[in-house]
């Protein structure tokens, strides 16, 4: 296990991000949390190691200003946890282009912007890591959240490409794919209200099943622990599933015929 001393976390004010901040502080890591809002970590013993910076990572001007501040404080960063994200749901037929752009902007394009600005700090670390919170939905496309799945699939491809491009810098990129997780993400999902009548029942069943699975899923603390564990590996893989059942599902999905996996998904969420 590598010794991590400094970490930047995006989306660190709630859910998996907040659990990750708590875990890092308990491990004695200095943490910079980037989020639109600040969270209450006052009960944390190592609170002096936390610097929360309010920031909308989709705002390039804010992001540039934030990294100027960070570069004045830190000369290096061991690991970037690119965790910020949100989800939309609805039919492909009724999703507006503005919604699609927002989904990719927050989940993918802004993640790239943060990575680009963090690279000078990562290059100066001994064992630099980029850990991206992806999703099982990035490998297994879920109906009625097609654009969320597509944005997470983009993160998986990004991690694979970064591992080759950044090899000379010794930077390892890791996309971690949790499955269902109990966080406020479920309640914060933006639902498309303009569903065509012919899809209403199917969409309602699918989203209801999805939300029930999420509310009974892994706790955020467990997923955060896996992110931390993978970040500390000396020779990490580019892609990881979280939890035995989801790792098995991801492996099976690659082996089974596409028609079979499509049928299974349709029975679960169709």
Image (cartoon, helix red, strand yellow):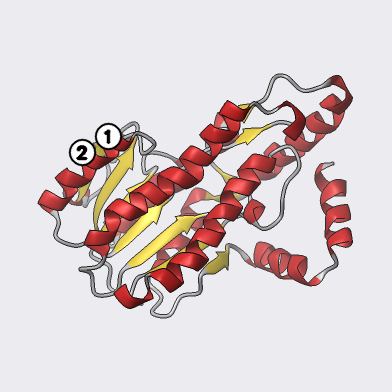
Secondary structure of residue under mark 1: helix
Q: Residue at x 33, y 54 (%)?
A: 116
CB atoms of marks 2 and 1 within 8 Å? yes
Give the left or right position of residue 19, taking residue 255 as reference. Answer: left
The answer to which image quadrant residue 30 occupies is: bottom left
Give the left or right position of residue 267, taking residue 19 as reference. Answer: right
Residue that label 1 marks: 61
Q: Is residue 233 visible?
A: yes
Secondary structure of residue under mark 2: helix
The answer to which image quadrant residue 124 occupies is: bottom left
Looking at this view, name the residue that lies furthest to the left: 72
| Residue 37 in picture, x, y percent from top left | 33, 31
Give the left or right position of residue 156, taking residue 16 as reference. Answer: right
Instruction: Report the quarter where the C terminus lies.
Output: top right
Q: Residue at x 72, y 50 (%)?
A: 141
| Residue 235 in picture, x, y percent from top left | 43, 80
| Residue 180 in picture, x, y percent from top left | 63, 49
Looking at this view, name the residue that lies furthest to the bottom: 235
């Amino acid at each position: 296990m590598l010794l991590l001393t400094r970490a930047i976390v995006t989306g660190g004010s709630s859910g998996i991000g907040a659990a990750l901040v708590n875990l890092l502080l308990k491990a004695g890591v200095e943490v910079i949390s980037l989020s639109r809002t600040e969270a209450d970590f006052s009960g944390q013993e190592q609170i002096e190691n936390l610097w929360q910076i309010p920031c909308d990572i989709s705002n390039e001007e804010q992001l540039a200003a934030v990294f100027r501040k960070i570069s004045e404080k830190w000369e290096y960063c061991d690991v970037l946890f690119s965790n910020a994200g949100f989800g939309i749901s609805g039919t492909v037929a009724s999703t507006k282009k503005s919604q699609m752009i927002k989904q990719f902007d927050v989940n993918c394009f802004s993640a790239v912007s943060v990575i680009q600005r963090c690279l000078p700090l990562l290059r100066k670390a001994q064992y630099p890591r980029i850990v991206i919170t992806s999703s099982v939905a990035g490998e297994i496309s879920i109906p009625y959240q097609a654009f969320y799945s597509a944005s997470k699939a983009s993160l998986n491809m990004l991690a694979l490409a970064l591992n080759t491009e950044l090899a000379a810098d010794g930077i390892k990129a890791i996309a971690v794919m949790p499955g269902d997780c109990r966080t406020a993400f479920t309640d914060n999902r933006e639902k498309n209200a303009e569903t065509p009548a012919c899809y209403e029942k199917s969409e309602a069943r699918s989203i209801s099943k999805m939300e029930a699975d999420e509310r009974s899923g892994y706790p955020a603390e467990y997923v955060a622990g896996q992110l931390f564990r993978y970040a500390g590996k000396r020779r990490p893989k580019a892609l990881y599933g979280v939890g035995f059942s989801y790792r098995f599902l991801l492996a099976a999905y690659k082996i089974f015929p596409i028609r079979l996996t499509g049928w299974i998904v349709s029975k679960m969420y169709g």
